[in-house]
Image: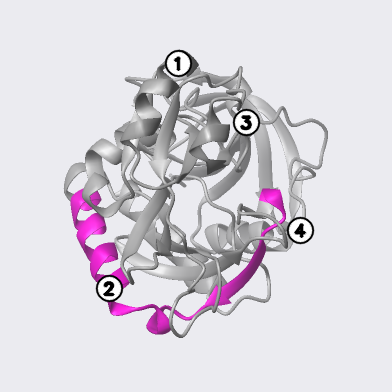
Amino acid sequence: MRKKVGICFSKELQGETPLSHIVGKLDVYIRLLKLMEVEGWDVYILTRKTYSGDGIFEGGWCFEEGGFKLVKDKLKMDVVYDRTGGIDFPISGDSLEVINEREFKVLAWDKWATFKAIGKYMPQTLLVEEKKDLAKVLPEIKSDTVVLKPVNGLKGIGIYIGPKEGATGFEFSKKYPRYVAQEFIDTDDGVPGVTDGMHDLRIVIVNGMPVWCHVRVPAEGSLLANAAQGGNLTEVDYQNVPDKIKRMVRAVTDIFSRKYSNPIYSLDFGIGKNGEPYIFEVNDQMGFPKWGMKNRDVFLREIIKNIKYRLQ
């Protein structure tokens, strides 16, 4: 029997164009779907809004020969590549075989849990349960500049980077009121052989290996390198990444490989004025490469291998 493999999104999808919400990288997603089709799998686009548990979706969009067809039958999926944000999917304790497993997704979603897991490689980080605790936490941060982030935030939203004295006037996100306070790492000296100035170096890990990476540089006048906040993104050859970062990548992938089932994720790095690298975040949901990027197919083919691993 042919295996059923799907990509699941959180957005409510309608009509015959289930990827209409993909902006800029639609051709890369279609490329992945075609690679999945070549494997002899029945390939679907799914939404978590129709998931009823135990691997069953109440319909989806079948991808075949470059086109989509809406299917309203119940679909029992063998593997699902999860592209939803947050932790509403997959369901806790569910039998669905999914990339990534819920336990890893929860770790990446919670910046405080991430720090407890790999804090030795990260900037000093302290938990701020609610805003009234900030006055007690700020004096403990070593740097004069502080970074405040929602514990469960995304896309650089709700972040403060600035002097400690201004932090108490910052309004915490109403959606995610728990925050972490972090030591500010000044990355203005750049990454040797990669970039000259302030940066955020993202390295994507699939099957325990770095498969592509890029450097994000803040827009002029900003300290936020997130693409959603206007950061500029340039692909980087992994061979040009400093050895100190490569050693850290190996250490963290070893930790995650031992504890979790072959997760797909990215590590965001910066190098401080002291020449030492720091991990800023772990992401279980990272953007796909652009069509013209050198390692596009390396990334996509490793996803195929990851799915095969879960079908065994």
Q: Secondary structure at mark 2?
A: helix
Answer with left or right where residue 33 lies relative to residue 12. left
Q: Is residue 166 visible?
A: yes
User: Are the residues flagged by discs 3 and 2 in contact, CB closer than 8 Å?
Assistant: no
* 126 versus 238 height, above or below: above
Q: Which residue is mark 1?
A: 130
Asked if the stretch drawn in magenta spans residue 273, the answer is no
Question: Is tag 1's residue or tag 4's residue first in the polypeptide sequence?
Answer: 4
Q: Mark 1 and mark 4: span between their CA atoms?
A: 38 Å
Q: Which residue is mark 2?
A: 244
Q: Which residues are magenta?
A: 228-257
Secondary element type, mark 4? loop
Disc 3: which residue:
10
Q: Viewer-proximal residue, 150 or 5?
A: 150
Gap in angstroms between the C-alphas marked 3 and 2 = 37 Å
Q: Amino acid at mark 1?
A: Glu
Q: Position of residue 77 (x, y in %)?
A: 47, 35
Q: Is residue 243 inside the magenta stretch? A: yes
Earlier in the chain: of badge 2 and badge 4, it is 4
Callout 2: few (<14), some (14-19), or many (20+) C-alpha neighbours within 10 Å?
A: few
Quadrant position of residue 272: bottom left
